[in-house]
Image: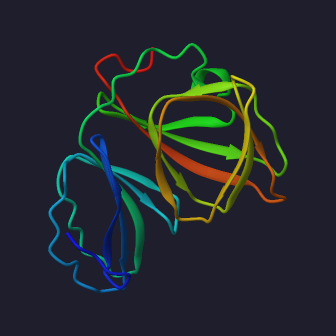
Amino acid sequence: MASSTSDPIQIASENEYVRIVHVNLAAGQTPPKYAPAATPTVTIDLNSGNVRYSDSDDRRPHNTAIREIRVELKAAPETTPLAGDAVRIEPTRFKVVFENDRVRVVRLRFGPHERGVMVSHPPRVLVTLTDVSVKLLFADGRTDERGASAGVAAWLDTETLQTENLRTEPLEVVLVEPKSARGFS
């Protein structure tokens, strides 16, 4: 599907595991025809931060504007169990908001200038709910600074890292982690 910047449904990126779709509909606007790459879908409402899981094409009627990111789950990447699983290591920052046999959805929050501990993440889609500016320290000693505006989504591979929020405001993101049969144990 070709898209222009005025299209209310835009494919932001796609790989063998997920399709990431931005949806921007005005109040009462009829959604255009769209064929998802796969179902189920995890939807992140960018206005409220709410997360919804659906096993079917979601064509809800709406009376308000919709700004959301949809992560269509095509396949699960092969993963091995993570000894430093972020949810287990830092449960105060990493909260599971939804989990089933196909996906785990995690909300991550850091206060202003907070620094976490070294944790591991499986392959995932990261969706920014706030503006993000972070310094990362990787397990191999490399460092990197990354930033993104609120409302951005990207695929990230397995990483072990420590995160420091460089902003004077809280940081909040949603992680959508497709699961293989092995899960995250």
Residue 103 left/right relative to 34: right
What residue is drawn where x is 23% and y is 78%? 31
Residue 54 left/right relative to 24: left
Where residue 80 appears, as percent x and y from the top left, is 42, 15
Residue 81 left/right relative to 10: right
What residue is drawn where x is 33% and y is 29%? 77
In this view of the protein, which residue sits in the foreground, 52 or 24? Answer: 24
- Tell me the quarter of the picture where residue 73 sits: top left
Where residue 107 appears, as percent x and y from the top left, is 56, 43
What residue is drawn where x is 68% and y is 36%? 93
- Tell me the quarter of the picture where residue 88 sits: top right
Location of the C terminus by quadrant is top left
Residue 108, placed above or below residue 161: below
In this view of the protein, which residue sits in the foreground, 137 or 28? Answer: 137
How many discs mark residues in the rendered view? 0
In this view of the protein, which residue sits in the foreground, 147 or 23? Answer: 147
What residue is drawn where x is 50% and y is 65%? 46
Where residue 113 appears, as percent x and y from the top left, is 85, 48
Residue 4, placed above or below residue 173: below
In this view of the protein, which residue sits in the foreground, 28 or 131? Answer: 131
Location of the N terminus by quadrant is bottom left
Where residue 147 appears, as percent x and y from the top left, is 67, 57
